[in-house]
Every structure is written in structure tokens, then in C-alpha cells.
Image (cartoon, rainbow, N blue to C red):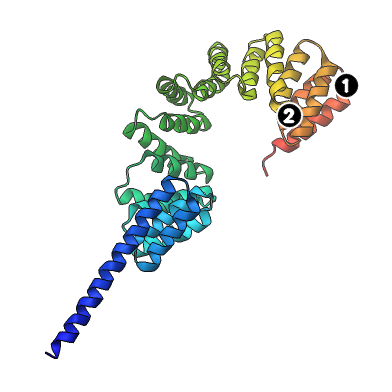
Amino acid sequence: MTARPFLLLCLFVITLSVTAQTSAEDHYNRGIELRENKDYDGAIAAFTKAIELKPDNAQAYSARGDVYVDKSDDKAAIVDYTKAIKISPKYGHAWVGRAYSHFYTGDYNGTIRDMTEAIKLGEKDIDLWLHRGMSFERMHRDKDALRDFTYAQKAYPDNKWGHHNAGVIYDKQKNYMAAFAAFSMEIKLAPDDAQGYSSRASLANRMKKTSIAIEDYQKATELDPKSDGNWNGLAWAYYLSGDNDKAFTYVTKALEINGKNSNALDTRAGALAGKKRFDEAIADWAKAIEIDPKNAEFYKNRAKAYRSMKKLDLAKADEATYRKLSTKP
């Protein structure tokens, strides 16, 4: 008989524990529902209650972290994801969530570390390789970035972003043929997206393939007519081909969209100089320099116009500035 009260007490404790766990689960599920309905404050309150009732609930911490991300509070999200990882070190979702929050707060080392761990744990989302690659790129580790992007190309061949990002790195490395192939695949996968055409067109200009650049920029402006960059790219392609009239026409459209586009002002100045309208060209270069005074090319281009105008002192001054800005520290 003396053991009975103890047995009853044990049963009471077990029942209370099960009830608490069930209640924590109820709050967790309620939090999921509230988040789906975009009631983020309500979701946070529900997940907080679930955590209070079951402090070792890694999923609740991670879920609350997800809601903080929805509210653009990545710092708070990192705190919750970190708690989830401490409770459950092999919980891949928390590693992924914290990795993205590190990325969007500019902690690229943290992004690389967490995404690497998430990949080791078996997470398969292509964005892990893409964002880790972008983190490497922003840390000027282009070789590591290219490794991730080329993996994305091979493992997820139908996703345009692996091809696009690989193309950007190839372009930076001056591996133009590989970049051209990557951008071409991007276009094949997303023929209605202006970005692929504009990327390949910009590359074609540097490869001196102006006819391809013109064709691609024409398609890009058709798909995205509000992009001043695309109109300026088209104008620049015509300028490189020697057609100053068309260059002037299209760069004017770019400047109608964005009058403070310094590169477009430089393009129009070049077209005006090609038409021997030097005073107008000088005025455009002055505006471009006012907007971007550290762009060495603007001084170099204006110097050429001054020499054509026989204003040698002004030309020499711009050439000196060009050399100063072009010299690496």
C-alpha cells in the first residue's frame, strides 16, 4: 500500500509531461498556420509558447527563426537558428536558415561555413551552391566560386542560375569562349528573360563581335524596354561598329529612362565626338565625371576630344588624371 501513492505520483508526472509536450506541439502547429497566413507576430508568439513548454524543441526555434526572416530580422533569426543547432547539431534546416541569414547580413565566412555543413548533412537545394559560390565571389575567391557554379551547372543543368553565375566568373577570368557558352545555355533555358541576352551582348562587345551584341541587345530591349543599361549597351554596340547616328538615338533612350547613368553619358559623348560635335561631347563628359569622378575612362575619352579640338593643356590634364586613377595602389 505504501508504494501506491508513489506510483500515482509517477503517473501524474508522466501524464503532465505528455500533456505539456502535446500542448507544445499544438502551439508549434498553430505557429505554422499563422505564418502561412502571414500573421508573423502571432506566429512568433505561438512558437515562443511552444519553446517555453518544451525548451529543447529545435524545430520551434528554427521555425521562429524562419518567421524572423519573413520580418527581415536576420540577426534575431541567427540567434534562433543557433539555438536550434545547439540542441540538434544535425538539423539541416537550421544550418541552411542560418547560412542565408549570414549571407543577407554580409557575413560571407559564416555563409560558407554553414552551407558547407548543410551540404555535408545531405541538403540538396541548388541555392546552397549558388549562394556559397556568390559568397566566395564577394570575398574575391573566384576559383572557389567557379567550382560551386560549375557543380550547379552539372548537377542542376535545367537551372539557369548555375550557367549565368559561371558565365560571370568566366568573363572576369577573360575565358570568353566559356562565358559565351554559359550565357548561351542561360538563354536557351530562359529565352524570355532579358538578363541572358544582355550578359551575352556585353561579352560580345568585348569580343569585338558587335553584330551579335547588337542582335542580343535588341532582344534584351524588347524584353525589358525600361532598362537604361540595355539601351546603353545597344548604343555602345552601334558606337563600336562605327554607327554614331544609331548610337546617339539609342543612348538618348537610355538617358530618358535614367539621366544620371554616367556610362550612358559617356556613350553619348563618344557618339557626339564621332559626329564632330565636340562642345556637346565635352559637356556630357563633364556630367559623367560629376556623377562618377573616379572613372578613369571618362578622363581618357575626354582627353581625346580635347586633342581633336587642339586644346592640348586640357587634354594633358585629363591624361594625367587618367594615369593617376589607373595606377593601382
Would you say 269 lies left or right of 223 here? right
Q: Amino acid at mark 2?
A: Lys
Numbered mark located on residue 260 in the image: 2
Q: Give the image location of residue 42, x and y in percent.
A: 47, 55
Q: Give the image location of residue 146, x and y in percent.
A: 43, 37
Looking at the rendering, in which quadrant would you find the C terminus? top right
Could you give the CA–CA distance between mark 2 and mark 1, rounded to whole angstroms? 27 Å
First in sequence, mark 2 or 1: give its number. 2
Find residue 228 and report its image quarter: top right
At x 54% / y 51%, what residue is drawn? 105
Looking at the rendering, in which quadrant would you find the N terminus? bottom left
Q: Secondary structure under badge 2?
A: loop
Q: Give the image location of residue 175, x and y in percent.
A: 48, 28
Q: Amino acid at mark 1?
A: Lys
At x 50% / y 54%, what residue is drawn? 41
Farthest residue to the left: give it.
Answer: 1
Numbered mark located on residue 291 in the image: none
Would you say 21 lies left or right of 212 here? left
Q: Residues within 10 Å of mark 1 (few under 14, many from 20)?
A: few
Give the residue number, with chain letter if any, for mark 1: 311
| Residue 185 visible in the shown view | yes
Closer to us: 146 or 103: 103
Would you say 49 lies left or right of 298 here? left
Give the mark toward the camera: 2 or 1: 2
At x 86% / y 23%, what residue is drawn? 312
Closer to us: 289 or 318: 289
Closer to us: 219 or 211: 219
Find residue 25 and report its image quarter: bottom left
